[in-house]
Image: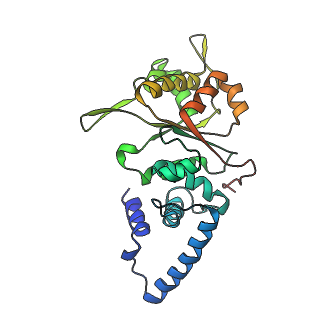
Amino acid sequence: MQKISETINQVLNPETSTQEPAKTMASRSKASVAKDRLKQEGVQSNIIQFDKCLEFFEKAGKEYVSQKFRIWREDHLILFKLLVYFYRDEVNAEKHGIDLHKGILITGPVGCGKTSLMTLLRFMLAPKEQYIIKSARDITLEFIQDGYSTINKYSKAAFQQTGGELISKAYCFDDLGVESNIKYYGNETNVMAEILLSRYDMFISRHMLTHATTNLSASEIENCYGNRVRSRLREMMNVIAFGKEAKDKRV
C-alpha cells in the first residue's frame, strides 16, 4: 500500500518530480499533445485530471496486475466513465447517462480488463468509499461450506461500524455467471441470484451499493439468473460495456 501511495503522489503531484529541466520540458510538450488527443476523445472534466489518472493506471497496473498492463486508447472512454462515477462528476455523469446513486455493472468479453480496472480503482478511493471485490465462484463455494448464512452475509448482514456509524458494505461481485447452481441438502439454489435480489431490497431501503463484472450479455444474464434478476440489475446498476471486439489484454 505504501508503494501505491507513492505512485499516486508522483502522478498527481508532478511538481515533486526530480527530472532534469530539459527532460521536464520534453515531458510537458508530450503532455500537451496528450491533452489535445484526450480532448478529441471527449474525456474532459473539471474534476478529473484524466491524463494523470492514465499515468497512475499504467504505473500501478504494471506493479500490481502485470508488467504487460496498459490502458488501450479504445478503452479510454470506459475508464473515463468509471472515474466520472467514482469521483461524482455530475456534469459528465449526466452527459453519459450515469446515475450516481446506483452501482456499476461492467460487461465485456473475457480478458478485456474488467477486473483489473475495478481492482485498481479501489486504490484511488477514500477508505470509506472502497468496495470489496469477491469472486462469484468463491461465494458459491462458501455456500457449500456454510449454507444459507452465506446469502445473508453478503446481503442483509453486510454492514460495518465506521466512525460510530453503521454503513452498508459495497461489494463488487467478480465474474457473474461463471458459478453454477449449488445443491445444499438436496435443494438446488442459485446463490448469486438470491444475493442480488436481497441486495436489491437493501438498495431500495438502505441504499446498499452493488458493483459487478460479467462476461455475459443481457440475454445470457436472464438465462442464468432469470428475468427478475436481470430487471433488478438494471434498476440498481449502471451498465458500462466494453465492445464485443474488445481485445484480450492477457495475450
The reply to whether residue 155 is in sight is no
Quarter of the picture holding the C terminus: bottom right
- Picture coordinates of residue 192, whole percent (x, y): 57, 26
- Picture coordinates of residue 92, whole percent (x, y): 53, 53
Quarter of the picture holding the N terminus: bottom left
Along the viewing direction, whichever of 128 and 134 lies nearer the viewer: 128
Residue beneath the point at 54% across and 32% down: 236
Residue beneath the point at 43% across and 54% down: 124
Instruction: Give the quadrant of residue 12.
Output: bottom left
Q: Is residue 139 left or right of residue 6?
A: right
Q: Is residue 34 left or right of residue 199?
A: right
**Please, is residue 209 above or below residue 147 in the view?**
below
Instruction: Give the quadrant of residue 218.
Output: top right
Along the viewing direction, whichever of 217 and 60 lies nearer the viewer: 217
- Picture coordinates of residue 114, whole percent (x, y): 60, 47
**Please, is residue 16 above or below residue 248 in the view?**
below
| Count of numbered marks | 0
Along the viewing direction, whichever of 53 and 7 lies nearer the viewer: 53
